[in-house]
Amino acid sequence: MPPATSRAFHDTWKTVPTQTITADGISFAYREMGQHNGGTPVVFLVHLAAVLDNWDPRIMDGIAAKHHVIAFDYRGVGASSGSPANTMEQMADDALTFLKAKGLKQVDLLGFSMGGMIAQEMVLKEPQLIRKMILAGTGPAGGEGISTVAGVANYDILRGLLTGQDPKQYLFFTRTSHGIDAGKAFLARLNERTDNRDKEVSVAAFIAQLQALRAWGQKQPADLSVVKQPVLVVNGDQDRMVPTSNTHDLARRLPNSTLIIYPDAGHGGIFQFHADFVPSALTFLAQ
């Protein structure tokens, strides 16, 4: 067994090494760990302006306890090389290129926010590659408020600067006591990894992703009735970034969906309720 594979059994998200693989001239940065037991790998698709270190360690370690887990940086994002894509379709193509370079024949997808939009494009492009999907904090193409995410994000970035807080405290969590405490705990977890952290997202990549969100939000909705895969759709009940009405709409459009809405929770509902989300995700993946 190769060293990287045997090591992956024992790593946590705090310690797992970052690796690279080259495909179509792009060096993709990725991390993988968990149970290499012949089951379907779970591939994580990250949110706007995020790199590998933006994944919640509790979710990564929780899913990796039962599954082979893989997360990667999009082209031109974090430690991956190349120019950042400015459409969801191109990001989906890049993700498919990465999966094929890894030699993966079938995967489960866990897409959060923008990652959930990329997952939808992937399953429409190559349905045979996808077994199941978990779509969190996301919505369908053309969904309410998706084209104006930039305004919400920039407003909360400014709020963060003025108050000395991480913008994710405002973007991902409610302003109730529960939401504020959950945000602080989540941000602390993101800092648990101190060695070999990923490169921060560049301004150019952030702008390209905002362009992709604007275009995708103005796009005509896709016919998701063709998606026969089981899909777990999850969000908080007070998502400001991708309004929660999109989550209900997405679940209605997908013929084989299960819906979870967390109370007093925003865009980062899966992070606030990680202790419930991880068992729910594991049960869904095992069915």
Image (tube, rainbow, N blue to C red):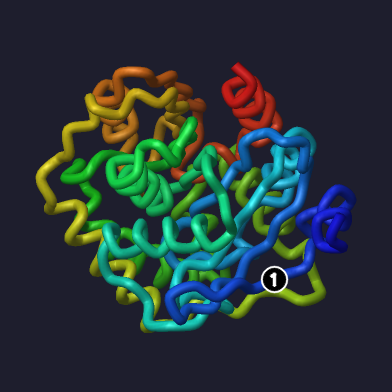
User: Is 286 placed left or right of 15 in the picture?
Assistant: left
x and y, in percent, of residue 116 in the image: 40, 45
Label 1 sits on a secondary structure element that is strand
Can you say which quadrant of the picture contains the N terminus? bottom right
Q: Is residue 38 visible?
A: yes
Residue drawn at the location 72% of the way across and 51% of the way down = 57
Q: Nearer the viewer, residue 45 or 130?
A: 130
x and y, in percent, of residue 272 in the image: 61, 39
Residue 158, placed above or below residue 280: below
Can you say which quadrant of the picture contains the C terminus? top right
x and y, in percent, of residue 80 in the image: 53, 77
Q: Is residue 240 visible?
A: no
Residue drawn at the location 34% of the way across and 23% of the way down = 228
Residue 94, placed above or below residue 275: below
x and y, in percent, of residue 246 in the image: 28, 35
Q: Give, as a three-letter code, the residue at label 1.
A: Gln
Q: Nearer the viewer, residue 162 or 215?
A: 215
User: Is 162 placed left or right of 33 in the picture?
Assistant: left
Residue 124, placed above or below residue 167: above
For disc 1, the neighbor class at 10 Å (few under 14, some 14 to 19, many from 20) is: some
Residue drawn at the location 66% of the way across and 36% of the way down = 274
Residue drawn at the location 44% of the way across and 41% of the way down = 129
Residue 191, placed above or below residue 139: below
Q: Nearer the viewer, residue 116 or 145?
A: 116
Q: Which residue is mark 1?
A: 19
Total marks in image: 1
